[in-house]
Image: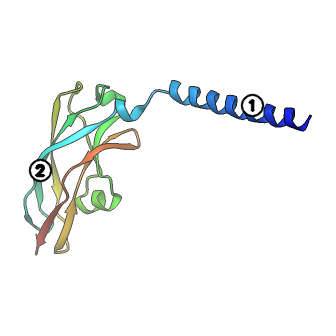
Amino acid sequence: MLLDVSRRRRVFSVTGSLAAVSLLAAIPSTAADNNSSFISQSVPASMVAGTRVSVSLTFMNTGTAPWSPSGGYLLGAPNSDIGATWQVSSVALPAQVAPGSRVTFSFRVTAPATPGIYGFQWQMESGTTFFGARSTNVSVRVEG
């Protein structure tokens, strides 16, 4: 009789595991839906403290879902310190971006008031979730 109970537990455990695997497989993956590649950026190597400077970054939609402004897609600073440093934490998506297409974000940042070397790095964001590749981290020298 103990053998039967043990077998039932094993069967239940296997069946339970298979059910969990089936449920997990049925949930769509947002990782494949949202993905990006960093293509290029134009960021000065040095800036004067407190000045406003134009920058641009280009990303490619390498996922399966289109990016749209109404869908909450934007360019964000993956590190809150970066957003605070440059006085910009996110940049609106200028238009819908189909899978396989590129988008360039052109915007202005304000150089920190204190001279030093500061990181500059961005990533695509959907809602509050960052996804895909980050831009290359540029060390920008801010001079007085």
Q: Residues within 10 Å of mark 1 (few under 14, many from 20)?
A: few
Image quarter of residue 39: top left
Tell me residue 84's x, y (percent): 30, 60
Residue 113: x percent and y percent?
Answer: 19, 70
- The residue closer to the viewer here, 32 or 16, is 16
Q: Using residue 113 as the reference point, say whether residue 76 is left or right of it.
A: right
Amino acid at circle 2: Val
| Image quadrant containing the C terminus | bottom left
Q: Residues within 10 Å of mark 2 (few under 14, many from 20)?
A: some
Q: Nearer the viewer, mark 2 or mark 1?
A: 1
Q: Which residue is mark 2?
A: 55
Q: Residue at x 13, y 70 (%)?
A: 142
- The amino acid marked with disc number 1 is Phe
Residue 61 lies in what quarter of the image?
top left
**Residue located at (12% from left, 62% from top):** 51
- Quadrant where the image shows the N terminus: top right
- Can you say whether 15 is above or below 78 in the image? above
Q: Residue at x 71, y 35 (%)?
A: 13
Residue 12 shows which numbered tag? 1
Q: Earlier in the sequence, mark 2 or mark 1?
A: 1
Is disc 1 placed on a helix, strand or loop? helix
- Residue 15 vs residue 1, the one in the foreground: 1
- Whether pointer 2 and pointer 1 mark residues with C-beta atoms closer than 8 Å, the reply is no
Which of these two is toward me, 12 or 77? 12
Q: Position of residue 91 (x, y in %)?
A: 25, 43
